[in-house]
Image (spheres, helix red, strand yellow):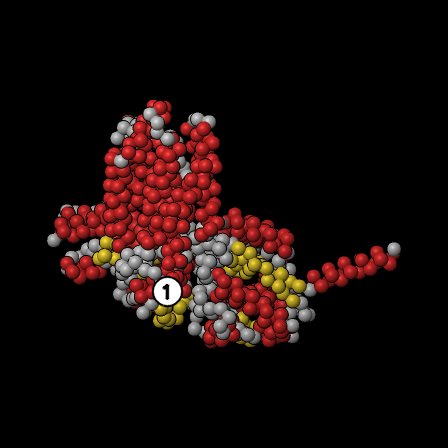
Amino acid sequence: MDILNAIVAFSNFVLIPATSYGSQLALGALGVTMIYGILRFSNFAHGDTMAFGAMITILVTWWMQALGLHFGPLPTALLALPVGIVGCLLLLVVTDRAIYRFYRIQKAKPVILVIVSMGVMFIMNGLVRFVIGPGERHFSDGERFIISAREFKALTGLAEGLALRTSQAITIATAIIVVAVLFWFLNRTRTGKSMRAYSDNEDLALLSGINPERVVFVTWVIVAVLATIAGVLYGLDKSFKPFVYFQLLLPIFAAAVVGGLGNPLGAIAGGFIIAFSEVMITYAWKKVAGYVVPWWSPEGLVQLISTDYKFAISFIILIIVLLFRPTGLFRGKAV
Amino acid sequence: MKKLFFAIVAVVLSSGESFADDVKLGIVLGFTGPIESLTPPMADAAEMAIAEVNESGQFLDGMTISAVRADSTCIDSAAATSAAERLVSSDGVKGIMGADCSGVTGAILQNVALPNGIVMISPSATSPGLSHNNNEDNGLFFRTSPSDARQGVVMSEILLEQGIDTVAVSYVNNDYGKGLSESFQASFANMGGTVTLNTGHEDGKGDYSAEVAALASAGGDRLVVMGYLDQGGSGIVRAALDSGAFDTFHFPDGMIGENLEQNFGSELDGSTGQHPGSDSPGTVQFADMVGDAFNATSPFTPESYDAAALIILAMQAAKSIEPQDYKDHILDVANAPGEEIYPGELGKALEIIMGGGDIDYVGATAVELIGPGESAGNYREVMIKDGTIMTVKYR
């Protein structure tokens, strides 16, 4: 019974939250890594791209809610998602045409593009806050829980409760679907193969007749899809606040770099590594330890690092990986 | 030409004259920021007191008072200081009703009120750190709310009376949260309770599940959330409810407001809390006066009315609008002896003072200023039932 309680407490406070957070980070890191692999720069505007896509989705969700449109037990935001993706894509294409293309034609160094993307980041950040305001916005509806802690306790008679929120289940399921489709696209379709060819050797790809503008456009489409889905899922699961997305940039980049920039598989692994480290290192193990080792009742909380230093963990992992394996765990491109 | 010159001088002088008939009071509250849903009724209440005095026409030979609002932001000391500085230097206010949150109140006091010699009466800054027992404030700072040293004791009593003797505490990491959590932990432990974990949270995060996981590990019969309603405090409550870590909560003043009912509704049934408030007849009269104009029971709203009223009455008692003159009269008008003054009787009070009489301002919150000029402390104990905040009793 005690072991069961320990497993339930562990799942409730570590496993489920970290898995859904990891999925969100993985989707974000995939976007970053795609841009790095194909367009060859670190896109600092990615967090705010996510915020923009989520913002469009929220606005459409509100409009649908006002019309009385609902998606049964699922959040209405899922219905609004396609519009959000299109809106996000429009912004990205306009940005690319107006800004990035200029530097691409000049064959500017990646470091210049990084700084350019920072400028874009500030503009997007301002744009989002201008349209929807800096405050917290709620847009989730439908059933909140698949099973709530109280129901679980009544059902099983255990002392510990296990809550699974609809948003967490949707996050994990969506992430699996999106990743599967992305890998199928990159490995099996002609366009996907041409993108990988462009990524491996730009000149050779041009010689074999691949249209670079088309590759760039498809990349932005994929980035828009990934960023909007990641942004909406994070907003549904936690809360939508423009500034929070800006802060998300750090764990997302940590995930992409740890996995190996430019390597999609690495981005996914990196996302989960960062998420699980953050949650497990800041979790207070007192309760779980109490169930597993009943004769040991620790004075403190058995917590390695206070939750205030959550973001520091991304940094530490980033530094360790860069010291010992500069190209990331999955051998991405040289940074 | 000469005539024209004199005409201009006359016009300028006369307009200057009419300017001097008007006293300006600053209202410095966090109209944006983590308690933005609490501040509008507070400002309305202060302006209601001013309007009442203006209507009576009894103030210092028919002078009028006007209010100038400024945003304290509640958390940004630099912004609050410059807002207050603007009130003093460019608007020329003679007193400040404010500020609201303890951190910015301290900042304005140190950086603006002390150097310029301006009286401040805060309706809601409750940090024990603002009790200036050694006259560090030059007698310029008062508050119509009690210090959190008192709130900590009241909170402990409420919890222990319900048989709750182990709690976990999550406080907002600033002057208000720290001060209150320390005073609560000390008094709760003194009375035989146990605080399993007393830890801070930062405002403005997207996700508080990690903080709540630590609190859940520490355990406790109830979670005490000393935060801000429109900020991290609500985030902690949301995460605790979602993960099933805690079912009931206890809320001090910063967490009680309309948005608590709106955001959580009946999910919080059985939770308790308290905020400064009293059942003196003044509170009812105040609510009657307000009517539907704004929410008279919102926390710190009656305190704001009283704060503005005290400044005005002290000016009348000193027969001067200068802070250096009237600061010594605030305790006189607030406390016995004298005729008791309730809300809506400001005109009468001004008349009594003019006639040389003495008043004891009771106001909307049974004002009784003790020690270094702060309220002795009456609290309204509340419980959440069927998604609404109900009054249990006053203590």
Choose between A110 and B278: the one closer to the eye.
A110
User: Could you say which quadrant of the image residue A112 lies in?
Assistant: top left
Q: Residue sitting at 84 percent across and 57 percent down?
A: B4
Q: How many numbered tags mark residues here? A: 1
Q: Is residue B120 visible?
A: no
Image vertical order of residue A243 relative to residue B167, above or below: above
**Within 10 angstroms of label 1, few (less than 14), some, or many (20 or more) residues?**
some
Residue B287 place in picture, x, y as percent? 48, 73
Q: Residue sitting at 14 percent across and 47 percent down?
A: A293
Q: In which quarter of the image is the N terminus of chain B?
A: bottom right
Residue A176 lies left or right of residue B311; in this view the side is: left
Residue A229 place in picture, x, y as percent? 33, 46
Q: Residue sitting at 32 percent across and 32 percent down?
A: A195
Residue A122 place in picture, x, y as percent? 46, 41
Residue B151 lies left or right of residue A10; in this view the side is: right
Choose between B190 and A218: the one closer to the eye.
A218
Residue A32 lies left or right of residue B109; in this view the side is: left
Disc 1 marks a residue whose amino acid type is: Glu
Q: Farthest residue in the left direction?
A: A1
Q: Is residue B295 visible?
A: yes
Q: Quadrant of the C terminus of chain B?
A: bottom left
Residue A16 place in picture, x, y as percent? 23, 48
Residue that mark 1 sits on:
B261
SS type, badge 1: helix
Choose between B356 and B71: the one closer to the eye.
B71
Disc 1 sits on a residue from what chain? B
